[in-house]
Amino acid sequence: MATNGCTSKSWVKLNVGGKVFLTTKTTLLKEPDCFLGRLATEDPDLPSDKDENGAYMIDRDPKYFSPILNYLRHGKVIIDDGLSIEGVLEEACFYSIKSLISILKDTINTKPSKGNRRHIYRVLQCQEEELAHTISNMSDGWKFEQLLNIGSNYNYGPDEQGEYLYIVSKDVLDSQVSDELQPVNLHPKVFQLRGT
């Protein structure tokens, strides 16, 4: 029986943690000595069970398997946002995909660590009439923290305005702290604090 020009024997079903993946033996044999390559060649030293549909059962997390399989398909490491690179590395180690292990370790070693980040704050003092403009012009990763009324006049007349402190924060790398603490081109007075 043929499927898209390939015999059915060239296709392999993998049931990874309850999710079924369909791929070819050619893909799995990109690294013949790895777990998946040995599975594709039905290595007798690698005992494996199949589910009721003939898929090889692998007790691993399927969300980390997609980047592994795609790497074998096209040789590129693509990890979706929100997916831990360390989790993908753990799976690459389980499957013994040496070239992928090396790439992932290099990537982890060159990315900035979370320990090199700082939390900085800006406190902007502004009049009531400037408040909407100030808030709407905050961008570039700054997040609202708090708004403090520091001197409202309750006898509103044409010249009487309330005063506010508008507090914002941002996480930055140590190397970016000095850039973020530069003067800001906003009309209100700006006080800047550096946190840890």
Image (cartoon, rainbow, N blue to C red):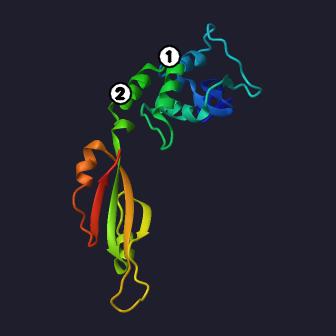
Residue 1 at x, y percent in the picture = 69, 29
Which amino acid, by three-letter code, is at mark 1? Pro
Q: Residue at x 35, y 71 (%)?
A: 134
Q: Nearer the viewer, mark 2 or mark 1?
A: 2
Residue 27 at x, y percent in the picture = 52, 27
User: Would you place residue 55 above or below residue 141 in this image?
Assistant: above
Residue 106 numbered mark, or none? 2
Which amino acid, by three-letter code, is at mark 2? Asp
Quarter of the image for residue 117 reads top left
Residue closest to the far bottom: 158
Residue 147 at x, y percent in the picture = 43, 67
Q: Nearer the viewer, residue 71 or 42?
A: 71
Residue 149 at x, y percent in the picture = 42, 72
Left or right position of 79 against 162: right
Quarter of the image for residue 14 reads top right
Nearer the N terminus, badge 2 or badge 1?
1
Residue closest to the far right: 52
In the rendered image, is residue 29 in sight?
no
The residue that disc 1 covers is: 32
Quarter of the image for residue 165 reads bottom left
